[in-house]
Amino acid sequence: MTSPGELERTLRENLRGEVDFGAAARALTTMDASNYRRVPVGVVAPRDAEDVAAALAVCAGAGVPVVPRGGGTSIAGQATGVGVVLDLTRHMNALVSVDPAARTAVVQPGLVLDRLRDAVRPYGLTFGPDPSTHARCTLGGMIGNNACGAHSVAWGTTADNVTELAVTAYGGTAHRIGTGWTGAPDGLRELVNAHLGLLRTGMRPGGTAAGGMAAVGMAPAFSRRISGYGGLDALLPEHGAQLARAFCGSEGTLGVVTEAVVRLVEAPPAPVLAVLGYADESAAADAAAGLLPYGPLTVEGMAEDLVPGGAPALPRGGAWLFVEMPYEGGARALVRAADPLDATVVTDPAAQRALWRIREDAAGTATRMPDGAMAWPGWEDCAVPPARLGAYLREFRALLAAHGLRGSPYGHFGEGCVHVRIDFDLVSAAGIARFRDFSGELADLVVAHGGSLSGEHGDGQARAELLPKMYGAEVIRLFGAYKDVWDPAGGMNPGMLVRPARLDENLRFAVLPATSFAGEVARCVGVAKCRMTEPGGPGVMCPSYRVTGEERHSTRGRARLLHEMLAGEIVTDGWRSAEVAEALDLCLGCKGCRSDCPVGVDMAAYKAEFLDRHWAGRIRPLSHYTLGGLPAWLRLIARLRAARAVNAAARLLPVPVPGLTPERALPELAKRPFTRGTGHRPEAAGRGAAAGWPPGAGRGSAAGLAPGSGSGPAPGLVPGLAVTLWPDTFTEYLAPEAGHAALRVLRAAGLDVSVPRGGRVCCGLTYVSTGRLDRARRVLRRTLDALGDVPGPFVVLEPSCAAALRTDLPALLPDDPRAARLAAAVRTFAQTLEEYAPDWRPPRLDRAVVGQTHCHQHAVLGDGPDRRLRERAGLVGELSGGCCGLAGNFGFEPGHHEVSVACAEEQLLPSLRAAARDAVIQADGFSCRTQIAQLGGGRARHLAELLAEGL
């Protein structure tokens, strides 16, 4: 038996690509987007087909199984393995060639689908299959699972769009297959000829071999038969022996695709969207099949339980069909014929995107129940003939209720394919038993309606055990013989499709401890939205992955490493893990994943928890004391009135500050703090002086406030609503100009503004971001004591501080009711004006604006009020999405400068270079303004400053 060490050495000697048997590499590939976990022995990233052949030869010689892996977004467990994982995304990701005239492209297996679509768009072409993971799934993975997507109504499955495949079998033998028997493995033609009758009669779902409905002529074949080797009948002589088509959907169990010739289709130049409203889900499902004769490109369905609170843009109804048509006349004819309860036809592309976003958001909404409980895959994509969909869904809902389970179906109603995530208990023995019982009964229900256990994502481990219910024992034996022809040694992805593992084995939750942190980490379902690399749009997640392209620097990768740290099987040193610390080191703490991740993974919070435990009882990195303790250092400098001396030292001394990167200039300290810069000394507080101001004091009172800092209305204004302007650390000591501008604007809007003493209140952000959570709790308790019973609202100018108060404060002090009250009272500058001065008219600036939306604003606070305020002020243009890259302490820490600059180069800096010469630069975050000043050469200002200048 070859040891892992010997295997690793042999692979290194024979391959030019990377070979990594380390704990981190293995931990990153234990899971895909399913409920399953299998621990590999190592990971290989081959450079080309020769490397693939060498790896398969070495592994076959050692008797070690192999699983090919693309984006790792498989939902049934087929992208996990116990042997060597082949990562085909790192090097084998090229678009080899495009032939627009022939409408074909040659691709490598690791090519992401959207890269292919972007490349052929100038020719008016596209690749028809488009699963929801199109921004990160790979062509090899799509071939392995025979992926479909929303447009398969018009353009079919991946198998319908593949003409040739280059395949390397276990052992290293190369095959080139297409149509005809050329390139077929020995024995395949003979196997087919020996089973012609079975291939003609037994392959339909619920067919005669299974004794199902097709036996009495009630279940015609349909396009979503993905389960098993569902394309095996393509090898029949009347179908021309389509070897490549039959290979699609084999889930890595036959060989490794190293190159593919794919068919392209003409992209409609101006598709039109018709949204049809129906009384309920059943009515929508019953109507879907009747729309197919009108030639739709898509027929997607969803019900109101996936639209919490409703959506104003949707027509009346309790369920909807989203039907895309190639032209407007056809859309309007379809609406007239469909007889919906209500309908809308949308031709404007932006309005279409807004409506499609509602449908796409359903995929994220489905992962959580209304009470916050998680819902899991496992029965994600069953399909039935479209004419049977309404009846099937009614019985499916009844089956859920009978087992006490919940799920919200949606999906490709035009092809009878239903997506659903269900709130299975996959931890307790009773919950797992119920999962198994339900799975068997649901398989029976699908087969009874002539359906396929998988209509899109493959069977993997989730459903392969139940394939005999669908195909019958004779077809299952034929499947086994088909695999044995291609893979006689059984080394390709064993346990999938043929001779499968049980569906309740290898569950990924079984290895986790019963802790709240483990529950948070397990939220990551692995759909890998964090692996998107294309810039543009409002999203932020995941800036470090966009820069490095390494899985360990994605949100999913970090979650997987934390999962394995808690499991203790691969990552064995727990909270002291060097692998986890290294992966989290480049996490910017942007919180983009909190909003952009479909399940709301908050890696910034997980990082803080890890750092807190990782450094417990040890001397921390210097940056944790310098940058992490920034509020205390700045407060001390202000008390000593030493800002000028510190600024001079920073400019003149050649020695960098310990714990800070030498590539960064330090921001200049304000000569006078914000609350001291009003020209008055704060008076001593009366009752409750230690708290910072007396509880119950009148809003015009000077007690505990900074007189002259906006504690009363401007002359000539009727006193308005009282608000409190939060003197955050950045505004107080580094950017007081933003505070003074905000005071001026808020007072001009008729608001009565008070300001707590500088240095008395703090959100604890820097202590949280460096994982000093006990210190953060002390700071936050002191802040709550200082505020007393002041009710708010609290206007927080710095988005990162507002986000910390909104989210970190109640999380760190869950038992203190004051924490929840303060969190609920936090408002941004624009939000305050919109809510509390709705009739105020801002000055018209009528300028182009560029700049940066702060990551924490995007993720936690939202920027809707800011957009509307800019529009009312005549500031035209969009701020950059993504992350500026400085991210508080991140960009000042040693080893981060290169990544910090690369993040800025993704969206922010190009937008500044492309801006008009007279454009104003807005960035509400101090970090964003600093990054712009240091890298972009311009001066960015807070929105309050821009409006104050307009006054």
Image (cartoon, grey):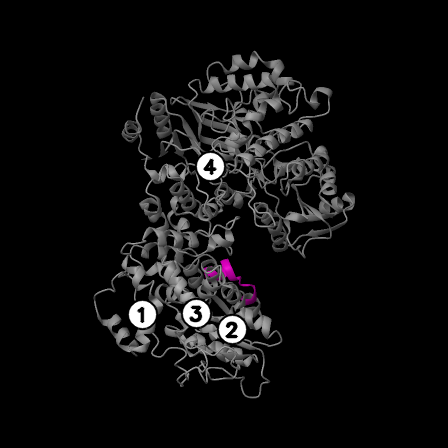
Q: On the image, numbered disc 1 is attached to which residue?
A: 633
- At horizontal 42% and vertical 36% (from top left) the residue drawn is 30
User: Mark on residue 117?
Assistant: none
User: Mark on residue 783?
Assistant: 3
Horizontal arrangement in the rendering, residue 937 relative to residue 862 (left or right) = left
- Badge 4: residue crowd in 10 Å (few <14, some 14–19, many ≥20): some
Q: On the image, numbered disc 4 is attached to which residue?
A: 510
Percent position (x, y) of residue 645? 26, 76
Percent position (x, y) of residue 78? 48, 32
Q: Secondary structure at mark 3?
A: helix
**Distance of label 2 from label 4 (alpha carbons):** 46 Å
Percent position (x, y) of residue 852? 46, 63
Residue furthest left in the image: 654
Q: On the image, numbered disc 2 is attached to which residue?
A: 789
Amino acid tagged 4: Ala
Q: What stretch of residues is rendered in magenta?
A: 854-866
- At horizontal 32% and vertical 47% (from top left) the residue drawn is 576
Q: Depth check: 181 or 26 in front? A: 26
Q: Residue 862 colored magenta?
A: yes
Horizontal arrangement in the rendering, residue 682 relative to residue 820 (left or right) = left
- Badge 2: residue crowd in 10 Å (few <14, some 14–19, many ≥20): some
Callout 3–callout 1 Cβ contact below 8 Å: no
Seen in the picture, residue 941 relative to 158 is either above or below; the reply is below
- Badge 1: residue crowd in 10 Å (few <14, some 14–19, many ≥20): some
Percent position (x, y) of residue 674? 40, 77
Query: Which of disc 4 and disc 3 is earlier in sequence?
Result: 4
